[in-house]
Image (tube, grey):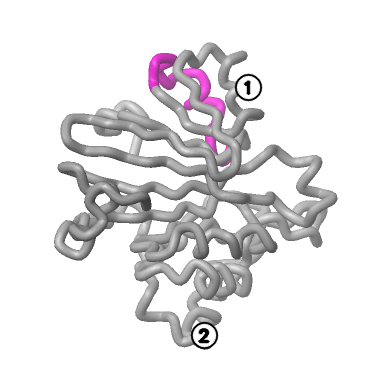
Amino acid sequence: MELENLPPVDLIVLSHMHEDHFDRFVQEKLSRSISIVTTGESSGALQELGFLKRYPLKTWEVLVVEKGRATLRVTAMPGRHGPPLLAKLLPEVMGSMLDFGRNGIRRSYRMYISADTMVFSDIREIPRRYPGVDLALLNLGGTRLLGFVTVTMDAEEGVRMMQVIMPEKAIPIHYNDYDVFRSPLSDFKSEIERAGLADKIIYLKPGATFAFRPNIATRESERGNAA
């Protein structure tokens, strides 16, 4: 999909400023008035590029967005772009929890976006604070730097993330659009079947669409309560 063919965009959630997430064409052509939720580090880079509506979040901080009767709560999740020492040389990264609500119901659908992270100790805090994930978007690919240092989830890490977050469904993304990926989707399929989690995965071909429907009935008890 070309940039000019996108539907009207209310908000961008940007995990970090790498060009496979926010490329040079987008940096040049995207409207400077669009709202972007991101890390503090990326917010500074966006400011230098002239973007006016930046909402930097630290881990566990929340931004609430309202449109009509709909509400979206964006919460920054832990993320670490590789092993501890190497991650310090890479951009700060932010996973995201998106809680969709409507008509006073605080949460009718919960979506987790992993971003480019490994599974590390802080990730295990996520299901304790935010259980009941309806859909997880998992950045896979097993990106390797210098040919041997993995800095994004490979197939085994993807299965571990599934086992930690325990989403109802998950969609693997970001696994075939970069020349340093070393863990193809076929590896993930094999590992996920071995783990007995194949019924949890939705595989989308490029250009395909997945539509979700907030489950108002099962969330009715959460009206007015904290997510």
Which percent across, then down, holds residue 200?
37, 75
| Gap in angstroms between the C-alphas marked 1 and 2 | 40 Å
Residue 166 coordinates in the image, percent (x, y): 45, 71
Question: Taking 180 as reference, is 49 above or below it?
Answer: above
Figure quadrant of residue 130: bottom left
The magenta segment: 19-34
Q: Main secondary structure of the magenta part?
A: loop
Task: Decide: is 56 above or below 223.
Answer: above
Q: Are marks 1 and 2 in contact (CB under 8 Å)?
A: no
Horizontally, residue 108 falls left or right of residue 196, namely left
Q: Residue at x 52, y 43 (%)?
A: 76
Looking at the image, which residue is at 62% across and 74% down? Answer: 156
Between 81 and 187, which is closer to the camera in this rendering? 81
Q: Amino acid at mark 2?
A: Ala
Q: Is residue 71 left or right of residue 182?
A: left
Q: Which residue is mark 1?
A: 45
| Nearer to me, 65 or 86 | 65
Looking at the image, can residue 175 be seen? no
Picture quadrant of residue 9: top left
Of residues 210 and 147, which is closer to you in this image?
210
Q: Where does the image place residue 212, in percent across and percent down from the top left?
A: 24, 56
Label count reads 2
Q: Which mark is residue 195?
A: 2
Specify the farthest residue to the front.
225
Report helix, strand or loop for mark 2: loop
Q: Is residue 26 magenta?
A: yes
Image point (29%, 51%), residue name:
107
Would residue 10 appear left or right of 159 to someone viewing this image? Answer: left
Pinpoint residue 203: horizontal percent, then vertical percent: 37, 67
